[in-house]
Amino acid sequence: MSILHFSVDSALLRELGEKLVETVHVALIELVKNSYDADASEVDIVFFKNDGRSEIHIIDNGKGMNYQAVEKYWMRIATTNKEKSNVSTVFGRPLTGAKGIGRFSCRRLGGHLKLITTGTQGNNVVGIQPVLEQTIVEFPWTDFEPGQDVTDIECAGSQKLVNKQHTGTTLIISDIAEEWNQRGWNVLKRQLSVLSANTGTKRGNFEEDPGFTIRIIAPEFEGGVRDLREDFLNAGWGTLTATINKQSQAVCKLDALGIGHKTITSTVKFPHLNDVSLKLGIMVDDRSQMRDVTTLSKGNLQQILPAWGGVQVRYRNFRVFPYGDDDWLDIDHDRGLRKRIPKHDLLPFAQTLKGVDASKALLNSLSMRSYLGNVTIGEDAIGFDMKLNREGFVQSDAVEELKEFVRYAIDWSTIWRDFYIRNEAQRESLKAVNTFEEEINQKLEPAQYIESAITFLEQRVDHITNILPLENKQEIQESFFKATDVIRKHNESNKAELLHLRLVASTSTLLLIFSHEVKSLLGLLEQSKNSLTQLATKLIPQQRNEVLTISDTFEDLKDRLEDLLKMTALVGIDQRDAKPGQVALKDKLKKVENVFSLICKKYNIEIDYSDVPNNVALKNILEAEVYSILLNVFSNSIKSVIAGGTNRRIEVSATRYSGKTFIRIRDTGVGIDPDRYEEVFIPFISDPDGNLYSNLSKRLNPEDKLIVGSGSGLGLGIIREIVLSHEGTVRFIKPSEGWKAELEIEMP
């Protein structure tokens, strides 16, 4: 019996290298994947020309190969060594290739390959310096012609022991194919960005993966050296950087789509942070929010963010775990709680941006996986001590400030993104209006947009339904009428709310006018008081006493007006210049009581805050915010007790417990249905039960309507927004015996 053996024609290499690998760009991607699987931490792809000869060099610092490995694996077609394990041997990376044909991508790229690889010789013994062996092999692909057996073609190779080198592989491909184009180049960048997103991790018992850096040196296409990770970070919606200046302030910079370059220096200080910085790419899974779609796509972003998204920490060039794999910044935690109000000086900053609702500026926060990059803690940083298990830092002031610093920068960028989203929505709205105006050949005023659009649709629907059977026509017309009726009513509601907001906003201007006029009145009162005092000296005793009494009344009125003027000045100044601090509660209660003293005296309203200790203070809060809370609380209670009847009492108590301040305000007014406890905090809902203002109008003297009047429905909403911004709570609770309503405010 004869024994037969298969032979392999060289034509197979063309099938593997040129048919399976469709383009030169895909071929190059396959070779970089080989470097990744070889546990390289970096790879350089170099395109250059020497004396008119084009070459591509692919240089990595992976584990390389010794002569035996080259002979056993590299020189064998379709090896199965990768199938024996699905992870790399050093870092435990999931392998990206398993067919054993990636090396034939070299044939697709050019006519000649030179392989230079350095690996450890034989089996290494732990504790002994490994011996490195370098292998060089030449592959003249043009010699592998169809009709020849692959095993008959010789590839010249050599081996030698080397010192003072590191492991790794270099592929030098010459006589390269002239297929490179910009479109293929973009495909290359997008594919490789998935690998370059590996910024380092730790897997089981393997060595710590330091990440994978891909540099492309290709002047013909990119004009210099490109770090694909940097390109990737700069391709998303925005790039955020932050440092600490000499005054211990955060200096944050944002370069973002639709925003441009923005900078902020915090008023908040981080005295324990030194030699600390951050750089993050802000990634949004939306093509319209990508700055460079040649590098980034929804497809690769959906692969990258679940695996590599998160803010990592690098301490003295080493990654600190588990930061970046967990929600150490409480980003997802706060998103789940729908936290929306910025802290520190970011709240007044948000108020300066047109169209941004500062009280909701963080509702568009992205998930923690949407931030890709590092916080870098340098050699000069102090206060960062690793735990004994090397998992994170020991808790310290520096660690707490680090979290605050990073969240400050991220929250600031979120406010800008909210601004961007609102501007984009407005731009899209105007674009839609322009398109509609062209359709109807008519210029519209903003107030006409909704009604004109509905009328246009009604005409079109009427035209379309004319061809339908009568029963179908009536059904569609009825459904359409219901839908358009909802739109009309909702639009009218929005217009009424907008008008109300404009009226409320206009009070800031009126406040300035009022302050100016009150200052003039104070001068006149002072003059009048002095004149009366001088006149009293010329009068008989009885008349003198009467005039001095009038003079004292003027003095008392002047004092009250001065207190009121101080409050309006606090509310009216530029909040960016205001500094939060410790505010004594009882002192402010006295001043607010004085503001309402005339109306309280007239309607026999008793205000009691004797249960407020002198040492109770609210911390890290603006004085104007305390006044806003108290003025709104007292205003609501005064209206309620006047409307409620004859027993008109308001009581304020406060206590400090477990590091928190609890303030309770009770009154004997009309009360609130427990089912309405949450509803009353919704803006513009001023009297949900309909009991307050109907009873108030019956018991209020006509001349006092301007003082008490009808509410805007914003007071409780303002109180809640302020309290929430300081991580406190405010709610109505079941009133104590003898009271009709009780509001509880809890502040840290």
Image (cartoon, rainbow, N blue to C red):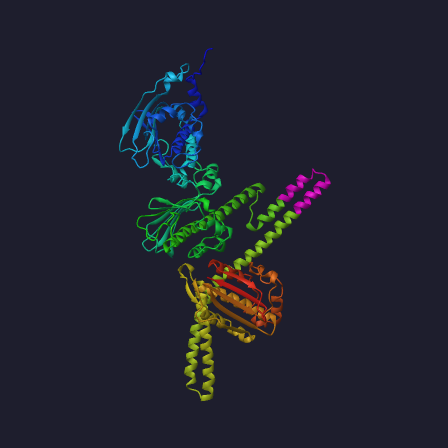
- What is the quadrant of residue 108 in the picture? top left
Q: What is the magenta range?
A: 457-481
140 relative to 613, above or below: above
| 62 sits to left or right of 678 | left
Residue placed furthest toward the right: 470
| 636 sits to left or right of 249 | right
The residue lying toward the viewer, choosing from 675 and 670, is 675
- What is the quadrant of residue 199 in the picture? top left
612 relative to 87, above or below: below
The overriding secondary structure of the stretch rendered in magenta is helix
Residue at 66% in and 40% down: 463
**Magenta run includes residue 406:** no
| 118 sits to left or right of 333 | left
Residue placed furthest toward the top: 1
- The percent coordinates of residue 544 (x first, y second) are 45, 86
- The percent coordinates of residue 359 (x first, y second) are 49, 56
- The percent coordinates of residue 247 (x first, y second) are 33, 56
The residue lying toward the viewer, choosing from 596 and 508, is 596
- The percent coordinates of residue 291 (x first, y second) are 43, 40
